[in-house]
Amino acid sequence: MDVLSIGETMVVFAPKEVGPMRYAQDFSTHIAGAETNTLIGLEKLGVKTGWISQLGNDELGQKILNFVRGEGINVDSVKLISEASTGIFLKEKFRQDQTRVHYYRKGSAASLMSEANIDESYVAQFKYLYVTGITPALSASCKQTIFKLISTAKSLGLQIVFDPNLRLKLWSEDEAKETLKQLIALSDIVLPGTSEGAFLFNTQSEEEIAQEIINLGASTVVVKLGSKGAYYVHNDISGYAKASKEIEVVDPVGAGDGFAAGLIAGIIEGLSIHEATEQACNAGALVTTVKGDVEGLPTKEEIEQMKHTGHV
Ligand code: CKP
Ligand code: MG
């Protein structure tokens, strides 16, 4: 298998109508979590993946497990526990162009993960470890688990890919800043957005953000610039790439995870950093054309079609 990740996946309830959620009557349900969003994107692009997690031994936990397994991800390291419930979140389209996320995940089954969830022989089956800044924000034991998993993975020769995924609803600014910088310093490939870069390094410039991250030890940095594309630095190569077509955004959540999937798949299939970044931009853009965090993740054929014809 190629890519391993660890994190929390939840059931999402999204009001069907636009407007403040207090008036909502009907909800649609989806499944989302940054790490499985990316793993599902990778599976769609032909990359074999595995996931370490914990879910409640409840109906929603079973729903998530079935869904993730159904997308092809290996779930041998996912535990169902009876001590806590599966986390959920609500995704409110407050106004047509304003999405708000509300978490109900404190004390969830995933937040109780500990070093006992890491099986070294399982980790040894992979070439890349994909981590986001959400998992260490879930609890003290999750934070400890992330550092342990990264050091185990590094000692086994895995490459570390990191998306800061700053979530200030989950932890304080000071703790987030300190921990995210520590995690960046342990990573080979780092995928920040400009607002995350600005939070961490006090600059809006993508070139300065990338340089700060290279100085911390990464060999590859790709800074996401939203609809403007992305800026990459890989060893001594740098440049810009963007999606092959302007798209109409239906639901922006999950774009970064689709981006990560496109990039990692591109690196695994041996694309140049420019081509891999372009594939990442196309995958991220396509995610936003469909409601839900994973439903719009593209196959390789869709990406090729977008690239060559500019049509989705
Ligand atoms: O940065 P993105 O919009 O790509 O991330 C979205 C995901 O894991 C979403 O699926 C949600 O479950 C989360 O980030 C989160 O915990 O906020
Ligand atoms: Mg993100």
Image (cartoon, helix red, strand yellow):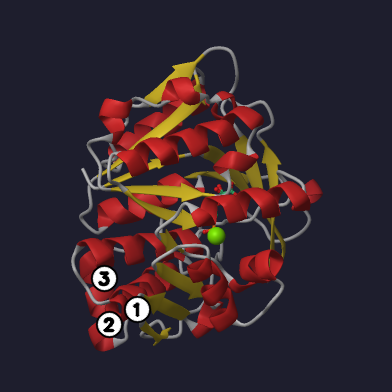
Label 1 residue SS: helix
Label 2 Cα crowd, 10 Å radius (few <14 / some 14-19 / many 20+): some
Specify which label sits upstream in the sequence, 2 or 3.
3
Instruction: Between label 2 and label 1, give the one nearer the viewer.
Output: 1
Disc on res. 307:
2
Q: CA distance from mark 2 to mark 1?
A: 9 Å
Dots 3 and 1: beta carbons under 8 Å? no
Residue for badge 3 = 302
Rendered residue at 32%/83% (across/down): 311
Label 3 residue SS: helix
Residue 18 visible from this viewpoint: yes
Specify which label sits upstream in the sequence, 3 or 1.
1
Rendered residue at 58%/24% (across/down): 112
Q: Residue 205: percent from the left, percent from the top?
A: 62, 82
Residue for badge 1 = 278
Q: Quadrant of residue 304?
A: bottom left
Label 2 residue SS: helix
Rendered residue at 31%/86% (across/down): 310
Instruction: Name the amino acid type tagged 3.
Output: Glu
Q: The C terminus appears in which quarter of the rendering?
A: bottom left
Determine whether the beta carbon of the residue marked 2 sits less than 8 angstroms from the nearest atom of ligand 1.
no
Dots 2 and 3: beta carbons under 8 Å? no
